[in-house]
Amino acid sequence: MTIEVVLLGTGNPLPDPNRAGAATLVRAGGRTLLFDAGRAVCMRLAAAGVLPLMLDAVLCTHLHSDHICDLNDVVTTHWVMSGQPSALRVYGPPGTRAVVDGLLAMLAPDVRYRLAHHADLTWEPVVEVHELEPGVVLDDNGVRVVAAASDHRPVEPTLAYRVEHEGRAVVLAGDTVPCPGLDELCAGADVYVQTMLRDDLVQLVPVQRFKDTIDYHSTVEQAAQTASRGGVRTLVLTHQVPTPPPGAADEWIAIARRHFAGEIVFGEDLARLEC
Ligand SMILES: [Zn+2]
Ligand SMILES: [Zn+2]
């Protein structure tokens, strides 16, 4: 095994008893990277055997709430379990610093209570924020992370990531329609994890706010076409919209199959892949 991927949360923004919010764990070369920090991310990390203190970095694809709503839990848990001051490294598009500043302001009462209560806890949470531009954003112990601009307009800027290690590559696309940056990252990748929706089903829901989501996400077809153009080995469908009923996987996979001949994985929480 060169790179390990664990789907921590495969849900969409609507609460679901079986699917946590957007988050994916990638382990390679002794490094532990978290991509996005949606609902219940710390519970799912624990299930994957990872505590926030073990994270080398959190990388955000964008600042939509369903991708960052439990980042505060990562920050707090990282802090309260630390034996000495240690920084949580958070990477994301421009705007990430303001979000983290706001999150730390929200946590101020909690920080005050814990500092007052624990004699051995004498430091506040330390969060090291890196606002990213496309390019190589991390190169550590043979693990390289490349970011590219994705297209989730009017949400911008947004990023997709590619993790490379020992000749293998995994792409974490986040929310995006097909675009040149995504194609660049996907070229020759082993695993491509794409958030997506079924536009045919979303169209049937008589709620305009729901239909609005169609124009800034990849459909299943588009995800499969991106996978095919890039010649990727495995396409992982995640962040399914609308929430699929049990047993729906085959139908979604069949739609993707019309456009992509490689392996197709219908994402479930805590599914694990290796390449
Ligand atoms: Zn989004
Ligand atoms: Zn999303």
Image (cartoon, helix red, strand yellow):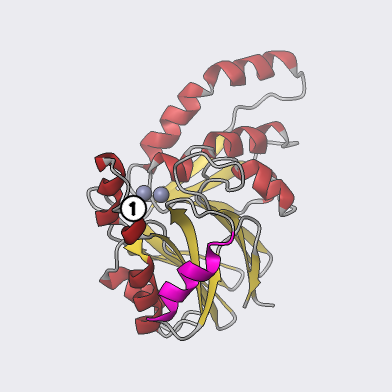
Q: Is residue 155 visible?
A: no
Identity, as a three-letter code, of the amino acid under mark 1: Val
Image location (x, y in percent) of residue 228: 39, 82
State left or right for residue 203 relative to residue 162: left
Q: Is residue 160 magenta?
A: no
The relative height of residue 46 versus residue 217 in the rendered view (above or below) is: above
User: Residue, x 42% and y 85% (percent of image)?
Assistant: 231
Image quarter of the C terminus: bottom right
User: Residue, x 32% and y 46% (percent of image)?
Assistant: 205
Residue 206, quarter of the rendered image: top left
Image location (x, y in percent) of residue 201: 36, 56
The residue stretch that appears in magenta: 247-259
Q: Nearer the viewer, residue 135 or 41?
A: 41
**Dominant SS in magenta:** helix
Q: Is residue 250 magenta?
A: yes
What is the total number of numbered labels drawn onto the structure image? 1
The relative height of residue 5 versus residue 111 in the rendered view (above or below) is: below
User: Residue, x 61% and y 69% (percent of image)?
Assistant: 141
Q: Does label 1 point to a residue whose CB lies under 8 Å from ligand 2?
A: no
Label 1: how many Cα within 10 Å (few below 14, some 14–19, many 20+) = some
Q: Nearer the viewer, residue 67 or 197?
A: 197
Image location (x, y in percent) of residue 172: 47, 64
Q: Is residue 110 visible?
A: yes
Image location (x, y in percent) of residue 265: 55, 71
The residue at which mark 1 appears reads as: 202
